[in-house]
Each structure stands twice: as structure tokens, then as C-alpha cells.
Amino acid sequence: MYTASGELAVEGVTIAADTSVLPFGTEVIIDGNRYIVQDRGRVIKNNRIDVYFENHQDALEFGVQYKEVFIERMVENN
């Protein structure tokens, strides 16, 4: 699956975010894991992030979680 940024979605790497808050290419750390903003979605607004899973059942089991997000590298909006 290709993301809105044109990148191939990769489990453990790809997240969707509100690109007015976290632009494409921004790297964040969540629970010690590095993710890259590569996608966006209609319901992903403000401070919400969607972690990409290849398997829908895995995403359902992960569920909704509230986490601290650390910005490792912020990319400027074009």
C-alpha cells in the first residue's frame, strides 16, 4: 500500500498524522520506537496519530492508546 506521501507503508515505521501539525517526513519516538509521518487521513486531526499495521486484526488489538510522542526531527511544511 502506498501512502499519501508516495512512500510504501511499512509496519513499525509508517504513521499517519495531521500534516499541518506533523508534516510528511517528520520522525517521532513513541515508546522508544522511531516512526515516520508518511500518511494522513480524514479523521486524523490535531494531536492524533494512526500507527500502520499490515493486518487489520493486529490494529484492532492494538486499539486506541494514549502515549507521549517525542519529535526527533521535524520537517518544515512546504
Image: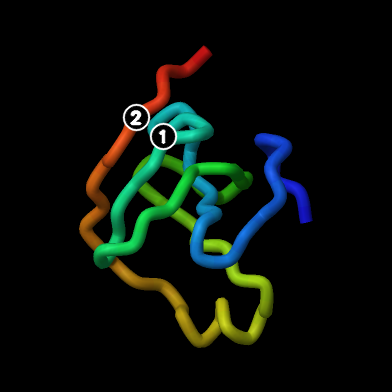
Residue at image position (26%, 52%) is 69
Q: Position of residue 22 (x, y in %)?
A: 41, 34
Residue 52 vs 9, above or below: the answer is below
Q: Position of residue 49 (x, y in %)?
A: 44, 53
Q: CA distance from mark 2 to mark 1?
A: 7 Å
Q: Quadrant of residue 32?
A: bottom left
Dot 2 amino acid type: Met
Dot 2: within a 10 Å radius of its alpha carbon, few (fewer than 14), some, or many (20 or more) residues?
some
Q: Which residue is mark 2?
A: 74
Q: Position of residue 11 (x, y in %)?
A: 58, 66
Do callouts 2 and 1 mark residues in contact (Cβ within 8 Å)? yes
Q: Position of residue 51 (x, y in %)?
A: 50, 62
Dot 1 amino acid type: Leu
Which one is nearer the viewer's eye here, 61 or 53? Answer: 53
Element carrying mark 1: loop
Which one is nearer the viewer's eye here, 46 or 15? Answer: 15
Residue at image position (48%, 38%) is 18
Q: Is residue 30 left or right of residue 50?
A: left
Q: Which residue appears farthest toward the top when viewing the image? A: 78
Q: Which residue is mark 1?
A: 22
